[in-house]
Image (cartoon, grey):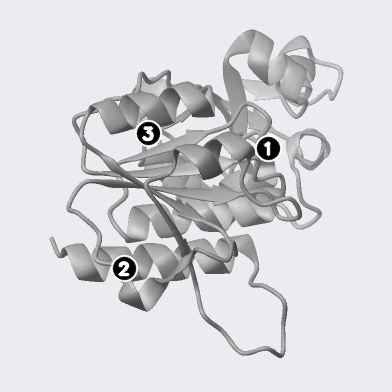
Amino acid sequence: MEITSINNKLVMYANSLKEKKYRDNENKYLIEGEHLISMCCKDDIECIFTTKDNYNLENVKVYNVNENVLKKLSFVQANQGIVAIVKKRNYQIDYHKNRYLICDGVSDPGNLGTIIRSSLAFNVDFIILSKGSVDIYNDKVIRGSQGAILKIPIIYADIKETILNLKENGIKVLASTLASDSINLKNVNPSKRFALIVGNEGQGISKDSFSLSDERIKIKHSQNIDSLNVGVATSIMLYYLDFKCGD
């Protein structure tokens, strides 16, 4: 089927999903680019809009559109010629896993995308975000994660309740903070089952995360800079913890 008008009802509906409130209401979001779409489970793809000739994906409705329609739906100026409506996946926290990452107020979409990508690279089983964190279906998060959000369970939850439940299930909780009692990352000997908490770019972790954690850790670095970007710091910590814990 071909769509040529930016005022088409389906196009207008798809375009509304650029806003968080509509993503939340509809439980759907947009994803752009053939690479990212190929990473989606086909059952989660509602439909595809594309300027590509003869594009086909088995059992998925494909709409051929002109460049004006694609520009309407695209998030970037130099679009890749394909956008899809995708259904969100709903998860419940599984407390029987080994490695968890808790994002306590991470607000920058680029940072969160990096964190999710590194989490997948370094074998995190589950990501939990505080309810005040940035929306994982923000396009910048999706692109920054390079599709990792499609490969790892992520959920928004109450942080205090989650930490207590993790501890009750025998999971050691590590909090990233520059507090005076924090241990240098190089001196940390993590248990096989752990949860790492990372905080807001400006404010750090919350009081609950600080007080409920079993151990506080930090990355020792030169005095030439006050702190590391949270995406970079999280990646370093996850690499080290993955290395220390082994497979």
Of circles 2 and 1, which is in front? Answer: 2
Name which of mark 2 and mark 1 comes first in the sequence. Answer: 1
Which image quadrant is residue 207 in?
top right
Residue 153: numbered disc:
3
Residue at the extreme left: 247
Q: In this view, does 21 lie to the left or right of 41?
A: right
Tell me the quarter of the image containing the C terminus.
Answer: bottom left
Name which of mark 3 and mark 1 comes first in the sequence. Answer: 1
Density class for disc 3 (Cα within 10 Å; few <14, some 14-19, many ≥20) is some
Amino acid type, label 2: Val
- Image point (35%, 31%), residue name: 41
Q: Mark 1 points at which residue?
A: 134
- Image point (49%, 64%), residue name: 182
Q: In this view, does 10 lie above or below 209?
A: above
Q: Is residue 122 left or right of residue 162?
A: left
Element marked by disc 2: loop
Pick whichever, 5 or 20, lies toward us: 20
Q: Mark 2 points at which residue?
A: 188
Can the viewer see residue 49?
no
Q: In this view, does 85 lie above or below 206?
A: above
Amino acid type, label 1: Val
- Do tag 3 and tag 2 residues touch (Cβ < 8 Å)? no
Q: Distance between the residues labelled 2 and 1?
A: 29 Å
Q: Where is residue 9 in the image (x, y as percent from the top left)?
A: 77, 10
Q: Distance between the residues labelled 3 and 1?
A: 16 Å
